[in-house]
Amino acid sequence: MDVAFFRAWIEEIVRVLSINRDLLTRLDAAIGDADHGTNLDRGFTSVRQALAETPQETPGQLLTLVGTTLIRRVGGASGPLYGTLFRQLGKSLGEAREVSLDELAAAFTAAIEAVKRLGRAAEGDKTMVDALAPASRALSAAAEDGIKPDDALERAAVAAAGGAKATIPLQARKGRASYLGPRSVGHEDPGAASAALLIAALRP
Ligand code: ADP
Ligand code: MG
Ligand code: MG
């Protein structure tokens, strides 16, 4: 996987977020403040501009710029959290021009640890972590089993989607939704839903 692969990932995220902006905002209206879709759509539109303005020669450079732009441009909890995810991905991938599935899986493991640290969130708290962590585990397992990258990314997408749906019966313990206490039960977490979209966008 080279810089063009990751550029295509970001382009796909931009496309999918613009289609799903209202859905994500509706999910956030139920248990938050109804801005998650617009936050991310605005953030990734800025990302696309930043990528167009600055040349990036490696996957690490590109993903670091994505993260920095999200931190700068997205207000709300999800900006720093997704920004940290992408920045740590970029940092883990370093200067390499080509990234193996093993390296991508390891980078995701580190990136999700960074998100959990920043948000002080664990799996089961009804956040984006509930979609990201199972996706990362699926990727690592697939890499270990020597499965080809396309199939590994498919498995990660399935795991993320399952993790997002599994937030529905949970009570939120982090973020705005936690203020609702038991009333947060019965709704999909918006950040878990967007995380599943981001992971699904990795599929070729
Ligand atoms: P805000 O809640 O500030 O309006 P967004 O609506 O953009 O920000 O993002 C909300 C999402 O961010 C939640 O659905 C949840 O997935 C995620 N989130 C919020 N707080 C945390 C946290 N402490 N750790 C991990 N994820 C969190
Ligand atoms: Mg919100
Ligand atoms: Mg907000």
Image: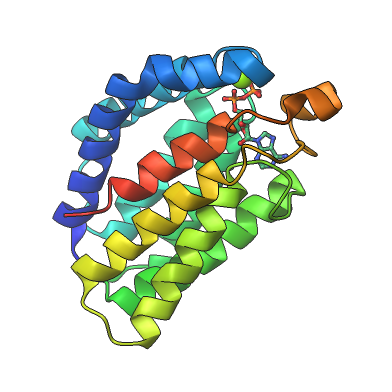
**Ligand 1 quarter of the rendering:** top right
Query: Residue 147: horizontal and vertical position, in percent?
Result: 26, 81
Residue 28: image quadrant is top right
**Residue placed farthest to the bottom in the image?**
145
Q: In screen coordinates, is 151 left or right of 179?
A: left
Judge from the rendering whether residue 80 lies leftward or rightward of residue 97; answer left or right. Answer: right
- How many numbered callouts? 0
Residue drawn at 27 percent across, 41 percent down: 10
Task: Give the residue displayed 38% in from the left and 19% down from the top.
Answer: 21
* Residue 185 x %, y %: 73, 31
Q: Is residue 68 above or below residue 43?
A: below
**Which quadrant would residue 189 be assigned to in this image?**
top right
Answer with left or right where residue 120 lies relative to residue 155.
Answer: right
In the foreground, 106 or 68? 106
**Quadrant in the picture for the N terminus:** bottom left
Depth check: give the residue in front, 77 or 49.
Answer: 77
Q: Residue at x 24, y 52 (%)?
A: 6
Q: Please tell me whether residue 139 is drawn above or below residue 12 in the rendered image.
A: below
Q: Position of residue 19 (x, y in %)?
A: 28, 21
> How is this picture coloured?
rainbow
**Residue 152 placed where, x, y %?**
29, 69
Q: Nearer the viewer, residue 15 or 93?
A: 15
Depicted 37 relative to depicted 70: above or below = above
Q: Residue at x 43, y 69 (%)?
A: 138
- The answer, for residue 157, to whether it is visible in the render is yes
Quarter of the picture containing the C terminus is: bottom left
Q: Is residue 89 left or right of residue 100?
A: right
**Residue 97 visible, this orientation:** no
Looking at the image, which is closer to me, 54 or 133? 133
